[in-house]
Each structure stands twice: as C-alpha cells, then as structure tokens.
Image (tube, grey):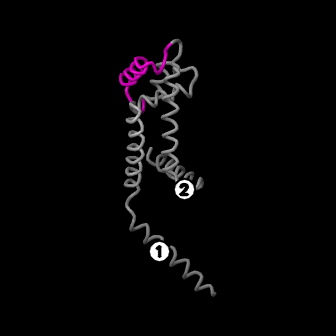
Amino acid sequence: MGLWTSCSRKYDKRKRNVLKMKNKLPIGYYLKKTDNLLTEGINNIHKELGITRIVWQILNSINENAEINRQKITELLSEFANKETISDAISTLLDRQLIREEKYLSLTKKGEVLYQTCFQRQKAFRQKATENITEQQYLQTIETLEKIIDNLK
C-alpha cells in the first residue's frame, strides 16, 4: 500500500466519522433522554417501596454517615430540596419509625431493611443501565461530561 492510499483511507475514515456525527442529535438530547430514563427508573423503584427520592437520599445519607444530624443532611441535600422539604421528609421517616433521632440520626431495623431493599433494586437498575459499557467507556463519558461542566461554569 502506497503513502497516497494510506492517507486517502485515513481521510475517508475521518470523513465517514464526521458524517456519522452530523447524523447525530445534539449532546443535550442524549443528556436529557438519559436523565429522564434514569430518573423514571429510580422513581419507579421508590414508588414501589412507598418512598420519594428525597426520602431515599436521607436514608442513604444516614447509612453512609454515622454521625449526621438534621443540619448536615440539609446541607448535603440542598441541591435537591429546600430546608422545609427535607425537614418534612425527616418527620415522615420518624413517624414511620424508619429512623430515630437522638444526638444524630440513625436507621432503625425497619429503616435498614427498607434501605437495603431499595439499594439492591437501584444497584440492579444501574447494572442494567451500564450493560455492554466497558469501564473505560464509562470513565471517558464521565470525563467528557466533567469537561463540558467546567467549560460552562
């Protein structure tokens, strides 16, 4: 194979890749579609278990942090809900005897069972979402999205 043939093939391959990209929708479409499908799947799990997303986030925060109080949870979840919503969700968890509040918040046995059930279902859902995606592909996607976020800050 001559130099011209080799260069020509590389050019043709690049041209085909550009044409493939031109037939794709903007990245925002894929981000929104992915977010919608992930959110819908997780919301369905929560609905089946009789909880909301913010309730799950509180349960998860308590599980991951041995010494966490209302103020710390409110700070952690401030991107997801306002103080009143978080306080109401904590009250609901207390009323349902899923958590207890002393110096810190902690899961009751009933809360631990709910947490584990929800966690396992979400884990299976996440595995389904990343089926046929290599770790390298996943990490590359995260890195690309981080760059886009940094570019837009």
According to the picture, the residue beneath numbered tag 1 turns out to be 16
Q: Is residue 24 left or right of residue 144?
A: left
- Please state which amino acid type lies under the numbered disc 2: Ile
Q: Is residue 81 magenta?
A: yes
**Disc number lying in front (1 or 2):** 2
Q: Residues within 10 Å of mark 2 (few under 14, many from 20)?
A: few
Which numbered tag is attached to residue 133? 2
Structural crowding at the residue carrying mark 1, measured as other residues with C-alpha within 10 Å and reported as few (<14), some (14–19) or many (≥20): few
Mark 2 element type: loop
The location of residue 99, given as percent across then percent down, is 48, 20
Whether 20 is drawn above or below 97: the answer is below
Query: What amino acid is found at the position of numbered circle 1 in the picture?
Result: Arg
Q: What's drawn in magenta, residue-wise?
A: 78-101
Q: Position of residue 110 (x, y in %)?
A: 49, 23
- At 38% from the left and 53% from the top, the residue drawn is 28
Residue 23 magenta-highlighted: no
